[in-house]
Image: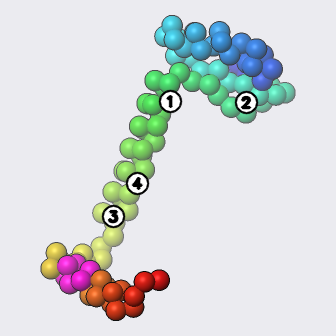
Amino acid sequence: MVVVPTSEVRAALGRITRRFDAGDPDPVFFGSHRRAQAVLVPIATWEKLLAHAEDEVDLDLARLRLADHRPWLAEEELDAALASAAEKASKRGPA
C-alpha cells in the first residue's frame, strides 16, 4: 500500500476525482510519515462497502435473535401489554 502525503492529495484532489470518474477503482491512502490516516475511494466502492457493512449488522442481529431462546409473546399477549401500558400512560398525563 502506497501512502501519499496529505499535502499531495490536497493538491491532486481534482486529478484523483477525474481518475475515479474514468472508472479507476483503486483507493488513495493518505496521511503523514508514511502512515495511512485516511482513504479516498470512488463513491461506487463506498456504496458497496456500506451495503456490506449493513448486511453484516443485520446478520449479527439475526444471529442474536436466533440465539435468544426466551419465549416470545403471542400477538394477543403483546396487544394486551401495549394496551395496558397505554392506559397507564394516559392516567399519568403528560410528562
Q: Position of residue 24 (x, y in %)?
A: 53, 11
* Distance (Cα) linking label 3 and label 4: 9 Å
Q: Is residue 88 above or below residue 18?
A: below
Residue lying farthest to the left in this orientation = 76
Q: Earlier in the sequence, mark 3 or mark 4?
A: 4
Whether residue 81 is visible here, answered yes or no, is no
The amino acid sitting under disc 3 is Arg
CA gap, disc 4 and disc 1: 21 Å
- The local secondary structure at tag 3 comes to helix
- Between 16 and 89, the one lying in front of the other is 89
- Alpha-carbon span between mark 1 and mark 2: 18 Å
Residue name at image x 24 percent, y 83 percent: 83
Q: Is residue 82 magenta?
A: yes
Q: Contact, CB < 8 Å: mark 3 with mark 4?
A: no
**Mark 4 or mark 2: whose residue is earlier in sequence:** 2
The span picked out in magenta is 77-83
Determine the secondary structure under disc 2: strand
Tag shown at residue 36: 2
From the viewer's perspective, is 17 left or right of 92? right
Q: Amino acid at mark 4?
A: Asp
- Residue at the location (46% across, 23% down)? 44
On the picture, is 75 further left or further right than 43? left
- Residue that carries the numbered disc 1 in the rendered image: 46
Q: Nearer the viewer, mark 1 or mark 3?
A: 1
Mark 3 crowdedness (10 Å alpha carbons): few <14, some 14-19, many ≥20: few
Mark 1 and mark 2 lie on one chain; the one further toward the N terminus is: 2
Spot occupied by residue 14 in the image (x, y as percentages of width and height) = 65, 12
Label 1, secondary structure: give it.
Answer: helix
* Viewer-nearest of discs 1 and 2: 1
User: Tag 2: residue type?
Assistant: Ala
